[in-house]
Amino acid sequence: AQTVTQSQPEMSVQEAETVTLSCTYDTSESDYYLFWYKQPPSRQMILVIRQEAYKQQNATENRFSVNFQKAAKSFSLKISDSQLGDAAMYFCAYRSRIGAQKLVFGQGTRLTINP
Amino acid sequence: EADIYQTPRYLVIGTGKKITLECSQTMGHDKMYWYQQDPGMELHLIHYSYGVNSTEKGDLSSESTVSRIRTEHFPLTLESARPSHTSQYLCASSESGEMNTEAFFGQGTRLTVV
């Protein structure tokens, strides 16, 4: 079974600074998808960014980018120019490309933005 | 905002009561999921469905049951609520197939059993 590990329960960053959230995963599959989801306080979980395992190029969405290291099974999220609205729980998630395609989540990282 | 809705948002209920948490989506998604999440903690998959009349248990054992009679509706039922069932329950849906499609989440139901 696939597992996802986020080793940073909490992180904080100054507004306008850059922060990196870590994620590692374990799988025997070669083709899969990785995601970062954001869960603001009392609000819906929303997708931040996704990465296809077969793509070598790291995904980027505006201020959000990932560092995908397939051999190391590492998938970190970098947030540039942090804003107060970025404060939330961030979850790393794994999904197989075939079969059940269940979404497996990590433990989450609570990100605080200091003004 | 995603077109997936959960009701109620908050529920406080006594031990032994039967409850049903509602989840509906208007996106025509075949796959639907129920996750259990304790405050500030990871999400655990408790049920999922590939489509109508198809449901399976997730990775975390749960005393709840689900049904999928209609594509858009995926309710979760607890026959006899206990304090150990106190948690947040998140419903999600996604398209089928091998496409890299995201899962959309409802706002969650925060259940407290007293």
Image (cartoon, coloured by chain):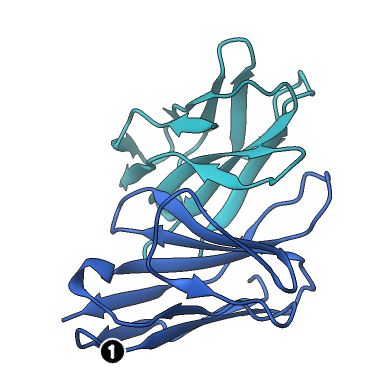
Seen as rendered, the residue at the extreme top is: A71
Chain ID for cyan: A
Check the residue under mark 1 and report the chain it is in.
B
- In this orientation, which residue lies closer to the viewer: B8 or A99? A99
B30 w.r.t. A100: above or below? below
For the point 62% across and 47% down, which residue is it?
A102
Chain ID for blue: B
* Residue B46: percent from left, percent from top: 47, 58
Residue B86: image quadrant is bottom left
* Residue B70: percent from left, percent from top: 73, 82
For the point 55% across and 40% down, which residue is it?
A93
* Residue that badge 1 annotates: B17
A36 w.r.t. B80: above or below? above
- In this orientation, which residue lies closer to the viewer: B91 or A78? B91
Judged from the image, the secondary structure of the residue bearing numbered disc 1 is: loop
- In this orientation, which residue lies closer to the viewer: B64 or B87? B64
Tag 1: amino acid:
Lys
* Residue B108: percent from left, percent from top: 45, 72
